[in-house]
Amino acid sequence: MSTVVVLNLTSSGHINPTLPLVTELVGRGERVIYYAIEQYRSLIEATGAEYRPYSHPEYLVPKVHQGEFFGSMAHFAKAAQVNLPALLEDLEQSPPDYILLDSMCIWGNLAQQIMKLPAITFSSIFIMHPTMKAEDILDMVYSPRPKEVVLKGVQSLYRYFEISQEINEQYHCKIPSLIEAFSNPQDLNILFTSRKFHPFSEMYDASVYKFVGPSIAPRPGTIPFPFEQLKPGVTIYISLGTIVNDAVEFYKDCYQAFGNRIERPYPHQVILSIGNKVNPADLGPAPDNFVVMPHVPQLEVLERTSVFITHGGMNSASEALCYGVPLVVIPHRGDAFLVAQQVVNNGAGVSMLPAQASPDTLHDAVEKVLSSPAFKQNAEELGQSLRSAGGYVKAADEIMAYKSEIGLN
């Protein structure tokens, strides 16, 4: 049995995909120590792993960064700076055999360097290849964004390098570069997606980058849902995830676009997940054909969904595609723009910017997806590539094979 430390970001989009993998590793005899924040303690302990808190959780709360990608880099660099001292002290007292780190976890990258421990990267998002040029990355992540977002990004990048210099002076280690900050490349890199879905996947060496597909398993504590209210026919599911869901006007637009009212009858039923940031009363009366809830059991809902209107989070998009559900992607931040791009490139849905979303454009986008069988067919083909990649069991196989290769029991 080996001891592995998991160093991850502290948001549902990054933690949830690791939970089935951690459960599998524990089942194979690994001792897993997982650093996170209190919000995720019960989920982590349910896997059989040992929960340990970061020393400064206030720096790890997910935020919507004005500078987007570079804003995230500056945020995570500061989180690394304040959390590293206690983390290193803890690890030095009882060094693990190896580390599992998220592709965006800067403090995991630094801890691995300082401790000189074997490490494996896992990623729940698309990652940058080490040979990609900076200008290509900038074009990919900032070309669809307004100039003010790009300016905030440049300011954030300057802050990132300021913090990086301070960290380097203290620890004398290599700070992740522009590309490394979104990939943390190691000798083994596990990607929770398929080659078919990942951009530029032909660049990634199969011996180093393992595309294992989404890490999906039944979730404990199923959220109650009135499935008996759903009728046969077309079901539209709408969710903006857990971070950008404070969207009263958008939800009102959905009521207007898809509401079954006398003046504008709409034949389909709609499931709307609004999160905890919005008071349903602020939206007005829900149309008769709507089921409106703070949260829903997403996997079970997707089994019954005809088209999914989503913010484009990697996990949500992948889960929908695994069920062959075509998408209308409305990306708000970060990697969601890349997800939207790949969905469109693969013919599995359509995309629009948040500013373009209105009752008419939402209505037209859904009707376009529903009226063309190609979207459904392409979503099913993409979903097959994700399902057949192996999931968390394949990820665990790759980790155990790597351990054997480097001489760990």
Image (spheres, rainbow, N blue to C red):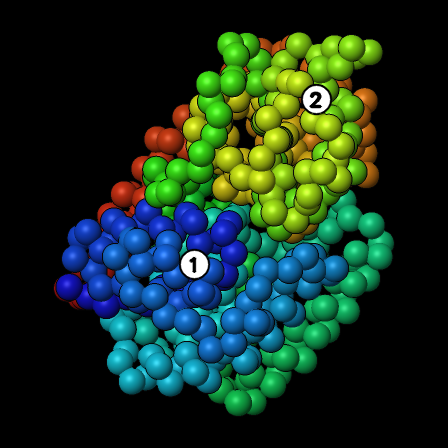
Residue 206 x %, y %: 37, 46
- Establish if 49 lies above or below 363: below
Residue located at (69% from left, 26% from top): 286
**Mark seen at residue 280:** none
Residue 259 x %, y %: 72, 20
**What is the secondary structure assignment of the residue under circle 1?**
helix
Residue assigned mark 2: 287
Label 2 or label 1, whichever lies nearer to me, is 2
From where the camera sits, is residue 140 visible?
A: no
Q: In the picture provided, is 20 more to the left or to the right than 228?
A: left
Query: Where does the N terminus fall, quadrant-wise?
Result: bottom left
From where the camera sits, is residue 356 visible?
A: yes
Residue assigned mark 1: 40
Residue located at (18% from left, 53% from top): 28
Residue located at (56% from left, 89% from top): 169
Residue located at (50% from left, 86% from top): 172
Residue 62 x %, y %: 59, 60
Q: In the picture provided, is 232 more to the left or to the right than 264?
A: left
What is the crowding at mark 1: few (fewer than 14 residues within 10 Å), some, or many (at least 20)?
some
Q: Nearer the viewer, residue 28 or 62?
A: 62
The reply to whether the C-beta atoms of the residues labelled 2 and 1 are less than 8 Å apart is: no
For the residues marked 2 and 1, what is the alpha-carbon distance in whole angstroms? 35 Å
- Establish if 55 lies above or below 71: below
Query: Where does the C terminus fall, quadrant-wise?
Result: bottom left
Residue 254 x %, y %: 73, 28
Res. 248 image quadrant:
top right
Q: In the picture provided, is 330 more to the left or to the right than 294?
A: right
**What is the secondary structure assignment of the residue under circle 2?**
loop
- Establish if 178 lies above or below 19: below
Res. 313 image quadrant:
top right
